Structure formats: C-alpha cells, structure tokens
C-alpha cells in the first residue's frame, strides 16, 4: 500500500519521464503496484481487501433493475437481493451501488445511472414537533396511475404521529364515501383512533378556502369521537409524518409491488406496513429519556416503530363504520352480471353493455343495483371482497337460461 507521500513522488517521477520499472526500483515496490497507483485503480492509504466482493454475483441483476427504474430506492433493492442470497449489510450495499464521487476515492460499483434532474435536489429546513402518545393521526392520499389492474390506484395512509406506525387502504376513488370507508379500514388496522385527525385541506373534509369542516363530514368525526384539525395553509411540514409515509410507501413498496389485482395489492400493502414498516427504528432522544433505555454496545437502544405504537393508547372504534354509501358505475357483461370488488352480481337479462349504478351502505351486507334511470333492479347479499364469487338469484338464473335456450335453432343458416 502506498502512502500519500509515495503516491505524490511516483506521480512526479512519472511526469518527468521515468519508467514504471525505474520508479518501482526507486521506491522498492513491484511494478504492478506502481502501475495500479499511477492509473488511479488504487488510492493511497486505502488497503485493498482480499475478500471477494459480495455484490459480484448480483451485479447484473442490480444493473438490470436500475435500467428498468433509475429512481428505485436502494433500500427496496436491498430487500430483493437479500432474498436472493446477498449476505452483507445495507450500509455495504449502499456504498457499493452509489455513484457519488468522494475525494481520492470513487464509490465501488457506480451501478446507479446518473440523473441530472435529481442531482441538484436539496431538502428544505425542518424541525421536530412533539407529538404526545395517542394524540394525533395524520391522513393523506397518494395516487398512482396505470396500476397493474388497469385503473388508477388511490391509497389513503394514516400515520400515528407519535410512533410513526402507518397503515393504508387502496380505494377506487377519492370521493367522500370512499374516504370514510378507507379511514375506517385504516383505523381498524391500527387498532383504534387518535383523539385528533390532522389533514391537509382536502375538499371532502375541509371547506375550500377556509379552515371549517365540511357539513357532510362533521357526522363522520362525531361518529368516531375525533377532532378534525386542518393544516395551516402552506405548512406542509405540519403533517410531515404521513408525507414521509407516502414517500416511503411509494418508493419502497409500490415500485416493487407485483400484485395484479386490487385485492392482492391490498394484502401486499398490509404485509409491508406490518413487517417492514413496523420494523423501522426510531432515535430514542425524540421520544424517551436515553437514561431510561438499556445500554447495548455503548449506545442507547433504539425502539422500533412497532414497539412505540404498541405502547400508544388509542380510543376504541365503534362496532360498525359510519354508514356512508359507496356508489360506483359498472357495465353489464354478456353473462348478465356486473363486477364489484372481486365478485360478480347478476342482473336481469337484456341489459348487456348498459352502465348500471351499484350502491353499498357501509356496515350492511347488501349491494343494490340500479338502472340508468334510477330504478332499483335487484338487491344482493354482499360477498367477501376478492372471493371471485358469482352471486346470482334463482329468478335471474331461470330468466337467463330461457333467453340462452331460445337462441338455439334447428333451422339451416341462411
């Protein structure tokens, strides 16, 4: 290994016309070593490791993933290579794939392609806000177009401000009824509700241009016993916990999600937040007195998001969700049925291609189907979401069978 002085001397002698052999004899080094320092392959003061590079066998895979998505998070990619057999730490992995150049040392692999748009991005100033346990839950939507199931994915995240525990629900729309259903789903996944709901100025929650709660949303908050607290205008940092959750979810989960249906994607999201999301560590100084924590290897133990959340006391939820009415529009297929949340429900024959209105009142087990003119056609029992069932009444079955049999004929075709 060259010292810094030897590196400077070798460089100066080479520029004066000395040969590599002469420099090697002068410094009492082998020619291969001198040549590696002159060419920049090695840096002075840095000893070359004899161990094999643990990323070598995954290099092609990592390069291919960055070719697919240059902005893929290193942490998300680390999860993938660990399942493939990568044994080193995340710190080593990030050091090997990063392309940032440091003084006298180039990052090892340089596998991430350069992005000019991202290279100049700088964060704004932030400050920690004290959040008492069980006091606040923050809400925010995220939207992802061209989902694998052929529609736009709308995700509502709820984050407990104190612990950072987050849960999410995927919805078909961001209207008020879907918002209420998604909020109820998030809170039941969290195990309760905080005393305050903090949102940005959602038009379905806050009257645009004011800080007043929408008249139609006030009964929802009363049903769960929560106080709605809107963020002040242009104060995005005030609900920074859920915004970080959105960034974490979109970068770590959505970019690597392989589900092809909304139901499978919801299961994948639930697993992500209950495993990877709850396993995140939190610096103890933000929440607890470091003197009260157990010492491990000379530093306070960092609690995980799950541990902090398990200690939070939340208010109990009502037995049933707020009775908002979900309304969607669905076309009739050639089997005289309409689709709703992974199942199909029968309608009278003869409506093929028509767009019908489906309504479901939260907390009930029924689904009503209405004609384009607003006439109720049928009321079905609601099947479990994603069950793949065909729910058909006996009357619809008999009527459809008669229509199908009437189409058969023994006459010759023209």
Image (cartoon, grey):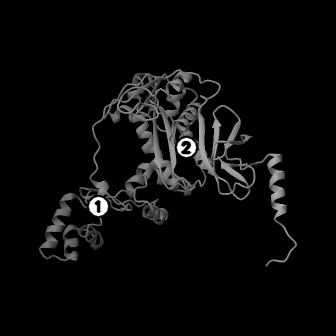
Is 258 located above or below residue 277 in the figure? below
- Label number found at residue 1: 1
Name the residue rendered at 71%, 59% in the picture: 334
Name the residue rendered at 35%, 32% in the picture: 209
Residue underneath mark 2: 170
406 on left or right of 218: right
Is 85 located above or below residue 310 in the figure? below
Name the quadrant of the C terminus. Answer: bottom right
Camera-nearest residue between 388 and 332: 332
Camera-nearest residue between 216 and 250: 216
Label 2 vs label 1: CA separation?
56 Å
Look at the numbered disc 2 and give the secondary structure of its residue. Answer: strand
How many C-alpha atoms fall within 10 Å of the one at disc 1: few (<14), some, or many (≥20)? some
Where residue 48 sits: x, y (%)?
Answer: 35, 60
First in sequence, mark 2 or 1: give its number: 1
Name the residue rendered at 51%, 54% in the picture: 256
């Amino acid at each position: 290994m060259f010292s810094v002085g030897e590196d400077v001397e070798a460089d100066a002698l080479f520029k004066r016309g000395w040969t590599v052999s002469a420099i090697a004899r002068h410094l009492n080094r082998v020619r291969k070593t001198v040549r590696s320092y002159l060419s920049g392959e090695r840096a002075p003061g840095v000893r070359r490791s004899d161990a094999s590079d643990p990323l070598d066998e995954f290099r092609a895979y990592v390069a291919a993933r960055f070719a697919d998505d240059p902005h893929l998070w290193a942490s998300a990619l680390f999860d993938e290579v660990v399942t493939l057999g990568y044994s080193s730490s995340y710190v080593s992995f990030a050091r090997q794939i990063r392309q940032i150049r440091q003084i006298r040392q180039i990052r090892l692999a340089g596998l991430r392609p350069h992005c000019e748009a991202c290279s100049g991005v700088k964060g704004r100033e932030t400050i920690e806000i004290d959040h008492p346990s069980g006091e606040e839950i923050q809400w925010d939507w995220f939207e992802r177009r061209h989902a694998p199931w052929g529609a736009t994915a709308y995700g509502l995240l709820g984050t407990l401000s104190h612990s950072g525990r987050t849960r999410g629900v995927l919805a078909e729309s961001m209207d008020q009824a879907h918002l209420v259903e998604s909020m109820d789903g998030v809170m039941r996944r969290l195990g309760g509700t905080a005393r305050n709901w903090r949102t940005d100025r959602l038009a379905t929650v806050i009257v645009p241009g004011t800080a007043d709660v929408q008249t139609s949303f006030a009964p929802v908050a009363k049903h769960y016993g929560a106080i709605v607290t809107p963020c002040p205008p242009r104060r995005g940092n005030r609900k920074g916990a859920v915004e970080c959750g959105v960034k974490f979810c979109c970068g770590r989960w959505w970019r690597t999600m392989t589900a092809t249906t909304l139901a499978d994607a919801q299961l994948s999201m639930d697993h992500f937040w209950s495993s990877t999301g709850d396993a995140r560590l939190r610096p103890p100084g933000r929440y607890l007195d470091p003197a009260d924590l157990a010492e491990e290897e000379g530093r306070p133990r960092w609690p995980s998001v799950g541990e902090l959340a398990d200690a939070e006391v939340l208010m109990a939820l009502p037995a049933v969700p707020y009775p908002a009415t979900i309304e969607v529009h669905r076309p009739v297929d050639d089997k005289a049925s309409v689709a709703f949340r992974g199942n199909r429900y029968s309608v009278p024959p003869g409506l093929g291609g028509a767009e019908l209105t489906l309504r479901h009142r939260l907390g009930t087990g029924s689904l009503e189907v209405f004609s384009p003119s607003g006439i109720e056609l049928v009321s079905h029992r609601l099947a479990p979401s994603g069950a793949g069932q065909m729910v058909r009444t006996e009357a619809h079955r008999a009527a459809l069978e008669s229509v199908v049999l009437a189409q058969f004929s023994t006459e010759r075709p023209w």
